[in-house]
Image (tube, rainbow, N blue to C red):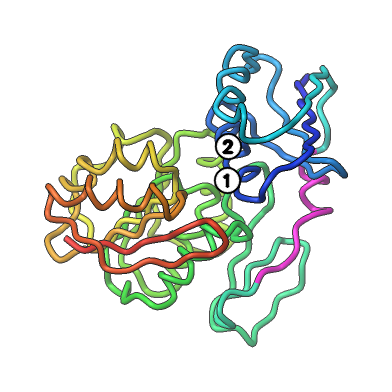
Amino acid sequence: MKYIQVTFSFTNIQEYQQDLLISDLADIGYNTFEDTDLGFAAFVDIDTYDASALHTVLAQFEGEIEYQYEVLEIEGKNWNEEWEKNFEPLIIDDLCYVRATFHEAQPKYPYEIVIDPKMAFGTGHHQTTTMMMQYILSADVAGKEILDMGCGTGILAILAAKRGAARLVAIDYDEVCYLSTLENTALNGVTNLEAIWGGKEVIPKEKYDVILANINRNILLDQIPVYDTVLKPGGFIYFSGFYESPDLELIKQACEPFGIHYVDHKKIGDWVAACFKK
């Protein structure tokens, strides 16, 4: 399979701006990113590449960052091998150890999650995933029904399962993420997790005690009314994938009409995760 490689070089860019650009590129189909000396390279299946969509994304950053980019057509790489070179074990709050299949186990940690590092997002290394895992580690999820939206590798749902959740539904619109969740669920011996491929339209019409939604601001704002229909009174939503300003206030305002109220939030760098209660 052939790919398009778009290599970005930056004169000046903040970390949060690069994270935001990568997130926007992921939304239009780019599924692998590699750091370079001057920026990063983004990869997309040649059949998915859309030059006008790329220009639309970049137009949002005009006047904010200085950059150059080069577009090349390349043959497919061994993506798993590339991931293995860059995937390091991760420890969350000295409680959860996240490792790949090629790392040694560490039984001293109460929770261990094995992730096969394919192209799906959600290995725990991004600040948003880390904060969501911190929430799960401190929350009472034992015996709860949990919905994980934008599940990526399934890591959040898997951690909730290991902490005693009764049943979990994990949903992602990206087929790579869906298949990755199935594989990682099996790797971790989780048997009470149902993975579904799709968006808000495939959410089972059931009631949940907890919703995990680590996506991005615009999708969250769009899906909040749907979350309200499936969240039990007294239930919690944990959101992430956005910034403190102005995103957090916009999400608060969108939740209020449904009686979903802000509780608190965490922040790492410019990224935020927030807890809300219905």
In which quadrant will I find the C terminus?
bottom left
Q: To which quarter of the image does residue 235 belong?
A: bottom left
Numbered marks: total:
2
Pick the residue in front: 10 or 197.
10
Q: Are marks 1 and 2 in contact (CB under 8 Å)?
A: yes
The residue under label 1 is which amino acid type? Ser
Q: To which quarter of the image does residue 196 belong?
A: top left
Please provide percent x and percent y for residue 210. Answer: 28, 61
Please provide percent x and percent y for residue 185. Answer: 52, 56
Please provide percent x and percent y for residue 188. Answer: 56, 64
Q: Which mark is residue 180?
A: 1
- Helix, strand or loop status at disc 2: helix
The residues colored magenta run 79-90
Q: Is residue 269 magenta?
A: no
109 displayed left or right of 200: right
The residue under label 2 is which amino acid type? Val
175 displayed left or right of 72: left
Which residue, given by chain and number where applicable, does mark 2 sit on? 176
Q: Residue at x 78, y 25 (%)?
A: 69
Q: Residues within 10 Å of mark 2 (few under 14, many from 20)?
A: some
Q: Which mark is residue 253?
A: none
Q: Is residue 88 magenta?
A: yes
Above or below residue 171? Residue 145 is below
Pick the residue in front: 43 or 230.
43
